[in-house]
Image (cartoon, rainbow, N blue to C red):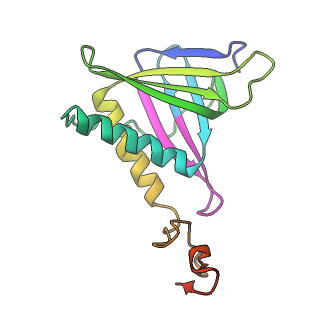
């Protein structure tokens, strides 16, 4: 792992989202890289949903429909940094036709907080959004009442005060 804690990947040549583990015990990640750096971020399922919804909203508000360009699956064997993302922000540069995705870790380490700024084309970000949507949907179904995850054995919904079992 690199001795630095701040990474700027501009341009991002590969950006990929995925998950590891079985539904209910999955961890979610994003990998961003170019010829100089490769960084892997970890976050929870709802953060993944928030990211793809923010991307979709930004494209909708700007009246843009770029052709999604998806990166191939996880192919990187070693990373310059790997951390759990805490804060996330996004900006759009209409002139360059790019989005800048910024991530920082929740805790910081001995070298200070890890930070990643990934600048990717509209097409790569649109592909990332589609990838994230598929990864999110591949998990456990969501309860229509409480929006919590439903286990294969059923779900006791807290909104029904535990009295209604939803199959």
Q: Quadrant of residue 97?
A: top left
Kindly identify the residue that appears in the image at 46 percent across and 37 percent down: 16
Q: Nearer the viewer, residue 62 or 39?
A: 62
Please state if 89 lies on the left or on the right of 111 as rendered.
Answer: left
Magenta-tinted stretch: 14-30
Relative height, residue 2 to residue 54 (above, below):
above
**Is 107 in front, or is 159?**
159
| Left or right: 26 as drawn, with respect to 107 | left
Q: Position of residue 52 (x, y in %)?
A: 40, 43
**Looking at the image, is 157 positioned above or below residue 40?**
below
Q: Relative to 1, does residue 77 appear above or below in the rendering?
A: below
In the image, residue 72 lies at what x, y percent?
Answer: 41, 38
Give the image location of residue 119, x and y in percent.
41, 20
Residue at 27% across, 35% down: 59
Answer left or right for 9 relative to 86: left
Residue lying at 81% horizontally and 18% vertically, measured from the top left: 110
Query: Residue 49: horizontal and vertical position, in percent?
Result: 46, 48
Residue 160 occupies quadrant: bottom right
Q: Residue lying at the far right in this picture: please name it.
A: 110
Say whether residue 81 is magenta: no
Q: Nearer the viewer, residue 17 or 97?
A: 97
Please report the residue visible at 62 percent of the width from the left and 87 percent of the height from the top.
163
Mark count = 0
* Most frequent secondary structure within the magenta stretch: strand
Q: Is residue 17 magenta?
A: yes
């Amino acid at each position: 792992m690199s001795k630095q804690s701040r990474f700027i990947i501009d341009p991002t040549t590969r950006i990929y989202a995925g998950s590891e583990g079985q539904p209910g015990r999955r961890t979610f990640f994003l990998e961003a890289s170019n010829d100089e750096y490769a960084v892997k971020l970890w976050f929870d399922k709802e953060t993944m949903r928030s990211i793809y919804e923010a991307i979709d909203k930004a494209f909708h508000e700007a009246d843009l429909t770029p052709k999604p360009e998806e990166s191939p699956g996880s192919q990187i064997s070693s990373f310059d940094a790997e951390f759990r993302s805490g804060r996330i922000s996004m900006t759009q540069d209409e002139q360059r036709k790019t989005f800048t995705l910024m991530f920082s870790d929740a805790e910081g380490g001995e070298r200070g907080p890890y930070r990643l700024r990934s600048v990717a084309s509209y097409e790569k970000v649109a592909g990332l959004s589609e990838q994230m949507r598929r990864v999110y949907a591949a998990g456990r179904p969501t309860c229509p009442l409480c929006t919590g995850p439903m286990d294969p054995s059923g779900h006791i919904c807290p909104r029904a005060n535990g009295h209604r079992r939803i199959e």
